[in-house]
Image (cartoon, helix red, strand yellow):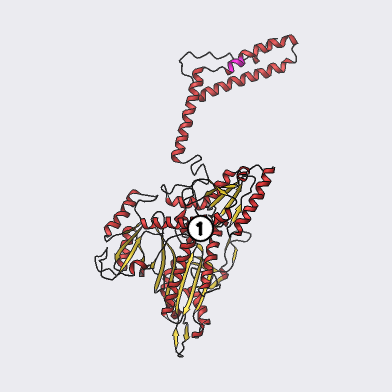
Amino acid sequence: PPPSPSRSLPPPPLPAAPGTPGPEPEAFLRKMRRTVVAAMLAACAVTRGAALLRPRALPAARRSLRPSLRSAVRLSATEANQGQQKQKKQQKGQKQQQKGKGGGKNTKEGNANYITPRDEDYALWYQDVIAAADMVDASPVKGCMVIRPWGMSIWDRLKQTLDGRILDSGAQNAYFPLFIPSSFLSKEAEHVEGFAMESAVVTHYRLKAEEPGSTKMVPDPDAELEEPLIVRPTSETMIWHMFGQWISSHRDLPLKLNQWANVVRWEMRTRPFLRSAEFLWQEGHTAHATAEEADATAREMLEVYADVVENLLAVPLTPGAKSPSERFAGAVETYTIEALMQNGWALQSGTSHFLGQNFAKAFDVQFQNKEGKREMVWATSWGVSTRLIGALVMTHADDKGLVLPPKVAPTQVVIVPVGKPGTEDAAAVTAAVDKLKAELQAEGVRVHVDDRDWLRPGPKFFEWERKGVPLRLELGPRDLASGSALMSARAGKLAGEKQPQSLETAAADVPRILEEMQTELFEMAKARSEARTYETDSYEEMKAVFDAIDASEESGIPEKQGFFLVPWKCDAANEKAIKEDCRATVRCYPFDANEGFVPGSKKCFYSGEDATHMAIFSRAY
């Protein structure tokens, strides 16, 4: 029998007249969905009744259904075209918006490893580079950082090299407490003034539940310390307290100690490696019988720092003396190594201090000289920190990621086997890779084989590139058949192109290529630093550069910003005025520029009075 009226299908829609605009895509889709659903319900109803139909009635039922199904999927050409065109237009607009605002594969929103170009935002570029290289991660403690294994291994390489040089100078390693009695800090007036504003203080030694049964913990009022403890911002006071117990005769001098430790300085504005509330460092402390010997030691250690930083990290430096306003709290002289980053900002990369007798007097450290008379000892302190990793990054990294000089790279060569695992070819490739690795390691090359079989070669290449590994060698069946590997260099004259490297000569060629890359990185950084060092006798000329940068709100790399070498009359008030006026500070009185300088031979570029020094001004981290 024919379908009952309750199961009748809706009439088919009338076709649109030619040229008649169709409905909006949303309305059209709703209409189509209603029609299809009605047809499906009718089909189900007919199907349910089909078992009761006689066989000859089935064709009639099917025929009654076909017009409704055809009407459900019948679309006017106008509706279809207009709907598709509008949808494409919307999608295109969204893609353009994403491209402009950030989104998609080549933006931070679409790619966790995206690196902001240096010219676009230098500060964000730096953050992106160290994150993409897996060097550091955010800490739940504000201002502190988590140094990940790749970043820590770079610090370990630096630490290992520097520690050897420190021990060669006659110093010995020791360790002193993390906590310092607050009374110690107040014994040296300049010292306490310099660190009081950034000291973390421990006042209690026990916690208790805020309320019975509560999980919230608060300091126990009954566990307050008799004397607050300062979390080590530096160790001069603690070490000189101990020196007072160890030194009594000229035979005890010189006393040279070094400590590898962490320190806490409660910085308000932090940036990983460059400035953080807690950081790792090395601090050396020495005691001497004469001022000349102490000052010579301070200068000697600065030379050690300069040599290690330039030869290991390939970072060119300007060594010099700090102005009185920039000296370490409590120092008579502070010597510094200043580096210039790619954006023209300076970075203090290490300091060495001649402390005179200030700490000896504060802690009453005397010795009996050869004539039997009592004298105060003379002191030095010197240190570098994980800030050098920040200098390394901002000197060499590019828009692809980290670039590591071979001498400090944890891995100098990564070998990536290419091919299908489990095949006969793969076994031959594995044997060749093992042989190549052994040959390179025998030459002192640090090698890693990336044999992760769950990753394709492309992602491996990208990972090691952004981590800054100097050389990558790809080895597959075809390479093996030709007796070579495909080599890619991260930096230097060989960068940018893959080229064959003979397996037979790889053990001899790779160390030479790494040495050449180390030299090239240093020379490129040196040329960049020299190009951004300007000599001027006019303060207005220097100020105009900084004013132009500020006016343009430049966040990338300004065209002209760097070191300004100027004649200068040492004056703390004028130094402060310049800092307030254009945010530039005296970075140092460079040794080379002042070696032959005659005071009074030039006029100060700011005051017009007789100059006392040649000085370098710059904005600095």
Helix, strand or loop status at disc 1: helix
Residue drawn where x is 49% and y is 27% of the image = 87
Q: Nearer the viewer, residue 104 or 392?
A: 392
Location of residue 373 with respect to 390 vertically, above or below: below
Task: Give the residues drawn in magenta, as a range.
Answer: 68-72
Residue 540 position in % (x across, y down): 27, 57
Q: Amino acid at mark 1?
A: Glu
Disc 1 crowd rating (10 Å Cα; few below 14, some 14-19, many 20+) is: few
Query: Can you say which quadrant of the picture contains the N terminus?
Result: top right
Q: Nearer the viewer, residue 230 or 494?
A: 494
168 up-or-down from 21: above or below: below
**What residue do we see at 42% from left, 51% from top?**
122
Count the marks: how many? Answer: 1
Residue 609 is drawn in which quadrant?
bottom left
Q: Is residue 305 above or below residue 294?
A: above
Q: Is residue 81 visible?
A: yes
Which residue in the structure is indicated by mark 1? 515
Residue 42 position by quadrant: top right
Q: Main secondary structure of the magenta part?
A: helix
| Percent coordinates x, y for residue 123 in the rendering | 43, 52
**Horizontal side, residue 516 vs residue 63: left or right:** left
Q: Position of residue 606 (x, y in %)?
A: 27, 63
> Residue placed farthest to the left in the image?
608
Percent position (x, y) of residue 279?
51, 63
**607 vs 133: above or below:** below
Q: Viewer-proximal residue, 31 or 145?
A: 145
Q: Quadrant of residue 208?
A: bottom right
Residue 610 counted in the magenta span: no
